[in-house]
Image: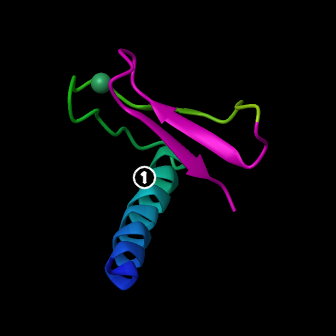
C-alpha cells in the first residue's frame, strides 16, 4: 500500500474542507453538488471540535474538524 499517496489525498481533501468552512463562515453560499441547494454549516455537533456541513436534503454531509 502506498501510504504516501494516501496521505496526499487526505491532505488535499482536508484543504478542500478548510476552504469550504472558510467560505461558509464568511457568509458565502455554496451549493450542494447533488441537489444544488445551499449548504448549511452546523456547529452544534456533539463533539466540540467538529462542525458539520450538510444540505437540505442530506445528500451532502461533511464532517469538519475545527482547529
Ligand atoms: Zn444535496
Q: Quadrant of residue 30?
A: top left
Relative to 57, say whether 22 is above or below.
below
Indicate left or right for 19 with 33 as reference: right
- Where residue 37 appears, as percent x and y from the top left, is 29, 23
Instruction: Please tell me which residue is depicted at 36% across the width and 73% down the height of the picture.
Output: 6
At numbered mark 1, what does the secondary structure look like: helix, strand or loop? helix
**Total numbered labels placed on residues in the image:** 1
Relative to 65, say whether 56 is above or below.
above
Q: Which residue position is annotated with label 1?
A: 20
Bounds of the magenta segment:
47-67
Question: Considering depth in this image, is 29 or 42 the residue closer to the camera?
Answer: 42
Question: Considering depth in this image, is 38 or 13 the residue closer to the camera?
Answer: 13
- Where residue 54 appears, as percent x and y from the top left, is 45, 29
In the rendered image, the quadrant that contains the N terminus is bottom left
Indicate left or right for 35 with 59 as reference: left
Relative to 57, say whether 11 is above or below.
below
- Where residue 67 appears, as percent x and y from the top left, is 69, 62
Q: Quadrant of ligand 1?
A: top left
Instruction: Please tell me which residue is depicted at 43% across the width and 72% down the height of the picture.
Output: 11
Relative to 4, say whether 37 is above or below.
above
Is residue 64 located in the magenta-colored stretch of the structure? yes
Q: Label 1: how many residues lie within 10 Å, few (<14), some (14-19) or many (20+)?
A: some
Is the residue marked 1 within 8 Å of ligand 1, measured from its CB? no
Amino acid at each position: 500500500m502506498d501510504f504516501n499517496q494516501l496521505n496526499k489525498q487526505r491532505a488535499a481533501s482536508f484543504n478542500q474542507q478548510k476552504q469550504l468552512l472558510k467560505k461558509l463562515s464568511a457568509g458565502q453560499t455554496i451549493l450542494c453538488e447533488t441537489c444544488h441547494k445551499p449548504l448549511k454549516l452546523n456547529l452544534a455537533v456533539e463533539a466540540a471540535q467538529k462542525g458539520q456541513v450538510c444540505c437540505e436534503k442530506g445528500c451532502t454531509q461533511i464532517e469538519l474538524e475545527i482547529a
